[in-house]
Amino acid sequence: MKGRSLHLRVLCLLAAVLGWSAAARAQTSVCSPPDDQTGRSHAWAVIPDHVDRVEAGACVLVHAPPRSGDHATESGFVQLARTFQEWPRALAAWGERVYLVFQQPGKDGATLVRARSLSAVDRGLGWDYEPLDRLEPYPTLVTRGNVVCSAAWRDLLLVISALDDGTHTLSLLENEAWHDLELPAPADGKWLAWSGREGLSVGRVGPGGMDTWTLEADHVRDGAAWRVQPGFEARAAGRQFPVDGLLVEVERDRSVLVVRMLLPGEAPIRTASLPVHDRAMLMPLSAQGPRLLMLRWAGADQAEETYPRLEVIELSVGTGAVLYEGMAPRSDVLSPGEFRMLATMLVALLIGVLVIVLKGDLDQDAVPLPPNTALAGAGRRLLGSLVDLVIAAHITALLYGVKTADLLGLSVLVQPGGQWTAIPMMFIVGGLIGTLCEWGFSRTIGKFVFGCRVVRVRGKVGARPGLVASLIRNGIKWLMPPVAAMAGLDQNTRHRGDQLAGVAVVIDLEPVIPGD
């Protein structure tokens, strides 16, 4: 939002920079193993948030829904699942559930590791995320070190932490309790963890490549039952992404990112390359073979619209083909959470309209008017209100970074990032402008253009309305438009807001000179 304070922009930028540097050290993108029956897999990544996005935080969780099965999404499609003010240290995924692992300093040099989870729910027309407005909590792990990776398998969560002395610890969450396990090898090197169909797997990348071990399904709770797996010719300088039993490795070579597919016991296969983009995040995805997504916020010169959009490159690692490149496709429907909020607002509006309408006429007698004035007709009032509406829409569009035409045409309802909230904000802005203008000048810009003004008809007839009267009148007019529209049915062209506030909209007449 362009109206955000400079202070908030600086804080968000600082958080994004710190979070981006943390992303290079921890596992902040992951994909779940494909379901044995449906073959569906979910991918997740945490990226810095955009300071111009509505309700921006330090980072945002991005979800790539399955590309196959029922309600499959098209290539390049991603959703913003949840915004956070704190960066997670690692992600893990199983099925539709993603685990986020946070850490914070504890007492006496200890580290408090907090695991939380979120589940993607297929609503048919879109994906929703539960629990709503919070995360599912798990017991806190007390350790000494920094989380470097995590993995999930069914109801188990594995976390590997690096200690200050160079050693590593492995902890397993089971039945709401943490258990310590032994690593299958000395702790030197870079450790990775991932979930497979057979169980939990870990890998250690060293100068000679990557050694791997698996805790099989029947022995996953027994830390001594590690089974050695074939190794990979991984490079310590590269980044490895586990995808459905395979490894994808990405390494920078001058101005490009070289993408290799690692096979157990075989030489790496270079399949493709990606451009180097500053502040871009890579996300593994399993969809009829390993894929890789590159995500970044599009610059102002790239996006056709002014609201923040994600730029996506989706690459097939097996063939090297670019499956999608460009702005992330938009969903054509509101998310279920946004739909519920919008439905609640509409119900509240309907109740308010019914309460005011059922009160009946508040003025039964003739309306006293100041000399040389007459009640403004419905057509004149409507045209003046349309001018005020356009002004309110333009101001709101500037605040939200959207087009005025999109706001008036209601197309912001299908724009991502909560842009639909610009619609109620437009009416709030219109009500505030109308209140201040009528209180201070007895007319808005629209009324001035069409020769109308608002005057009192109770008390001091003809005077400017007070602040409370202006607030009542404009609150009903802008927040309950159906009530304002009933002015066209009233014999005095006054709606309930006029009657409650004790005012009327009038036009000035030419004074009658005696003797003419």
Image (tube, rainbow, N blue to C red):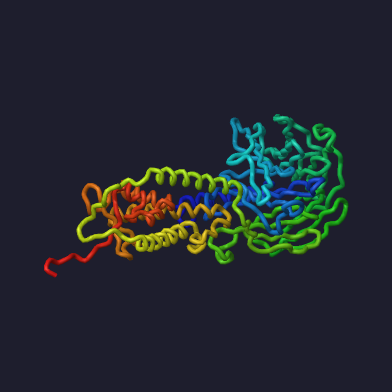
Residue at 53% over, 62% down: 306
- Point out residue 487 in the picture as x, y percentages from the top left corner: 37, 55
Can residue 292 be seen by looking at this rendering?
Answer: yes
Q: Residue furthest left?
A: 515
Residue 495 x, y percent position in the rendering: 36, 52
Observer-nearest of 174 and 181: 174
Q: Is residue 480 left or right of residue 303?
A: left
Image quadrant in which the C terminus is located? bottom left
Query: In which quarter of the view is residue 103 placed?
Result: top right
Q: Position of residue 289 (x, y in %)?
A: 80, 55
Residue 412 is left or right of residue 293, and the answer is left
Q: Is residue 68 left or right of residue 435?
A: right
Q: Which residue is at the front of the view, 457 or 169?
A: 457
Q: Is residue 313 above or below residue 497?
A: below
In this view, 511 is above or below 80: below
Q: Quadrant of residue 389?
A: bottom left
Residue drawn at point x = 76 percent, y = 49 percent? 40
267 or 57: which is nearer to us? 57
Q: Is residue 279 visible?
A: no
Camera-side residue of 276 and 470 = 470
Q: Residue furthest bottom?
A: 516
Instruction: Give the tally of numbered discs.
Output: 0
Could you tell me residue 456's position as x and y percent? 26, 51
